[in-house]
Image (cartoon, coloured by chain):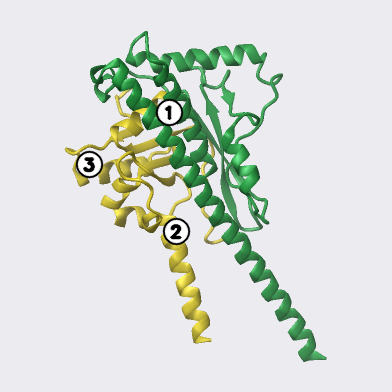
Chain colours: A yellow, B green
């Protein structure tokens, strides 16, 4: 009970995106795009001019917004801010690394599989010691 | 007597641990299958988008045309808590597609079972022992959202609104790309 994480319930949460232009365009066609009264969007288009700082700031913003439930981030973009993505451990918003047009999905860099690999390697070390 | 009782208990513990590990590995297999499915859906979407760009022209499909005026997302999520044990709760997501931007709380289409290919893949490949799920798409009977025709009309209207940022007349490839990315959105929820 002491370590129980509070899950906020909401009826119209958004899907935020940090990805390349084509991926963002596609998901906007699917109706995921949102622009609020202050002209803040729920997406960041990453191109050759986007800096790592901008990506970090967008990630931090989306993961702290109360109206965001899922953050989709291209795997190659997540690799640029790997430390930040791997250290994130809240259930909401959920982070999902997706492939991009120019960078296919690489299981070796997936944060979920990395944690599984680490878990199994820890388990095998622990059982070896026994 | 005591040692045989302890032996039986430890056998039970071991078989429970084995069951948990198998369930976990099943989940990982499902995760990889769904990621593969998402990759192929997105690839199809990118290809269709590129075809649309080729037929309509690069100046008609690019990020400068994206709508930066105030508008709400037509596709949103409902997040609830789902109990997964005495001290554990998991988030439960429900996808709401093509809600009316005028009245987002009503007239939305919750993604339905049936024709969705992703759900077919899921039913064929899932071998999970643990049936609890943290996210699902809820089926909703037509009666509870009004007539099926009105919901479909609304969804079509919202789809057209999304397409309208690229002009009134758009390539069929762009519409196909929209469908692919819609399927991709559903796929992300399963993952």
Residue designated by label 2: A113
Residue designated by label 3: A54
The residue located at (38%, 19%) in the rendering is B71
The earlier-in-sequence mark between 2 and 3 is 3
The earlier-in-sequence mark between 3 and 1 is 1
Label 2: element kind? helix
Position of B146 compared to A90: left or right? right
Residue A7 vs residue B94, the one in the foreground: B94
Same subunit under labels 3 and 1?
A: yes
Relative height, residue B42 to residue B98 (above, below): below
The earlier-in-sequence mark between 2 and 1 is 1
Q: Chain of mark 1?
A: A
Q: How many numbered marks does the figure carry?
A: 3
Q: Chain of mark 3?
A: A
User: Residue B16: in sight, yes or no?
Assistant: yes
Position of B163 compared to B79: left or right? left
């Amino acid at each position: 009970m002491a370590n129980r994480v509070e899950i906020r319930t909401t009826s119209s949460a958004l899907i935020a995106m940090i990805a390349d232009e084509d991926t963002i365009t596609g998901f906007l066609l699917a109706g995921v795009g949102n622009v609020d009264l202050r002209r803040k969007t729920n997406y960041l288009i990453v191109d050759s001019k986007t800096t790592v700082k901008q990506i970090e700031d967008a990630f931090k913003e989306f993961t702290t917004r109360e109206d965001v439930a899922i953050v989709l981030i291209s795997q190659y973009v997540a690799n640029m801010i790997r430390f930040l993505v791997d250290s994130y451990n809240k259930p909401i918003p959920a982070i999902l690394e997706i492939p991009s047009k120019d960078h296919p999905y690489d299981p070796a860099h997936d944060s979920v599989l990395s944690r599984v690999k680490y878990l199994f390697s820890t388990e095998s070390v622990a059982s070896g010691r026994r | 007597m005591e040692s045989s009782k302890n032996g039986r208990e430890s056998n039970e513990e071991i078989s429970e641990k084995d069951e948990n590990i198998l369930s976990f590995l099943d989940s990982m297999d499902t995760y990889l299958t769904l990621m593969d499915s998402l990759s192929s859906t997105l690839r199809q979407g990118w290809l269709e988008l590129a075809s649309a760009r080729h037929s309509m022209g690069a100046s008609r499909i690019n990020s400068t045309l994206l709508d930066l005026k105030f508008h709400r997302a037509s596709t949103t999520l409902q997040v609830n808590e789902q109990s997964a044990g005495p001290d554990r709760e998991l988030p439960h997501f429900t996808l709401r597609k093509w809600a009316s931007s005028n009245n987002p709380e009503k007239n939305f289409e919750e993604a339905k079972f049936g024709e969705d290919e992703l759900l077919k893949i899921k039913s064929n490949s899932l071998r999970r022992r643990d049936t609890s799920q943290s996210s699902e798409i809820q089926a909703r009977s037509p009666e509870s959202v009004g007539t099926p025709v009105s919901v479909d009309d609304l969804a079509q209207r919202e789809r057209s609104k999304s397409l309208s940022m690229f002009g009134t007349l758009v390539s069929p490839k762009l519409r196909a790309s929209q469908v692919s990315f819609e399927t991709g959105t559903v796929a992300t929820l399963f993952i």
